Image (cartoon, rainbow, N blue to C red):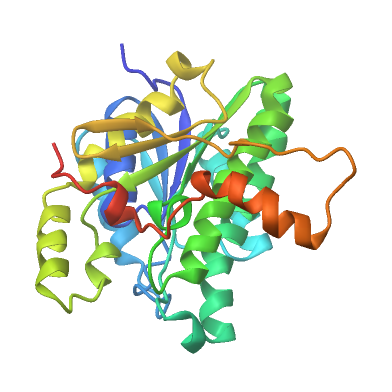
Amino acid sequence: MNMLGGKVAIVTGAGRGIGRDIALAMAAEGARIIVNDLGTGLQGDGEDAAPAQQVVEEIRAAGGEAAASTLSVSNWDSAHAIIETAVSTFGGIDVLVSNAGIVRDRIFHNMSQDDWRAVIDVHLNGSFYMSRAAAPYFKAQGNGRFIFMTSASGLIGNFGQANYAAAKLALAGLSKSLALDMVRYGVTSNAICPFAWSRMIGSIPVETPEEQVRVEKIKRMETKKIAPLAVYLASHAAQEVSGQIFGIRANEVFLFSQNRPLRSVHRAEGWTPRSIAEHAIPALKGHFYPLDRSADIFNWDPI
């Protein structure tokens, strides 16, 4: 039996890359799909209805059901309209994959207010608007699946991506909050950290031989490898899986840690700035995290 038979799923940013592969995979498992994509450039410029419509046609050609939406997730009213499109077209909404995103990479001291706002609006605000619009339906029917896309740039770190990293780390927090708030209604929420060569990753500047080697490794990680996990998390089989952060890197599946205390120190008489400097910090320093980038942590070839 199809894992998503009878389900209605919205996949944002589904015109290309990871979102397209997720939409196709969910349709192949029986879901009816709203393919949402504004069709912008990488930095959020322009609009093009063709990418979303092309994916719809692919799904229909394979015998599935799909409809296109070219509204922006970064606007409260249009986000609600995207949800209403699913309800009016297919009779409901069961799965929301918040995948839409743009990049405006800048070293921090050169990042403009517009660079910051544009990325936050699509990734974080857009995911909130879409989730908020879907939540009443999920609550009323006693079931639903939120799937967010986070990033190693936020979970671990990267150069020149303060806006993107902040949004992606915030999405991990949003996912966990939804998992906690909606568990009583049978709704789950999880985040996926994808490692794959996509249009967005292809925008990374390559300035050294070491960076070129790293990029060549990333090119070996296909976007279609992300889709099976998304399909699973959308299915009934994942009913007991919520509040987690998963990673996919080629054929590797990871479960990410979440922030917890590592070590504590105690002083009965309380702390002063001087005693913190002399005692607390030396005791804690062995557990400090270095200034790692994601490439420092995931430093082996994709399997």
Q: Position of residue 98 (x, y in %)?
A: 49, 48
Which residue is depicted at the point 26% across and 41% down?
A: 59
* Left or right of 274 in this view: 248: left
Quadrant where the image shows the C terminus: top left
The answer to which of 71 and 184 lies nearer the viewer is 184
The answer to which of 83 and 248 lies nearer the viewer is 248
Given the current orientation, which residue lies at the most extreme top position? 1
Q: Work out whether residue 87 can be spotted.
A: yes
* Left or right of 92 in this view: 56: left
Which residue is depicted at the point 43% across and 27% down?
A: 233
Is residue 159 positioned above or below 249 on the image? below
* Left or right of 66 in this view: 83: right
Is residue 106 positioned above or below 76 on the image? below
Rendering quarter of residue 91: top right
Q: Position of residue 122 (x, y in %)?
A: 53, 64
* Left or right of 100 in this view: 93: right
Which residue is depicted at the point 51% across and 80% down?
A: 115
Q: Position of residue 17 (x, y in %)?
A: 26, 54
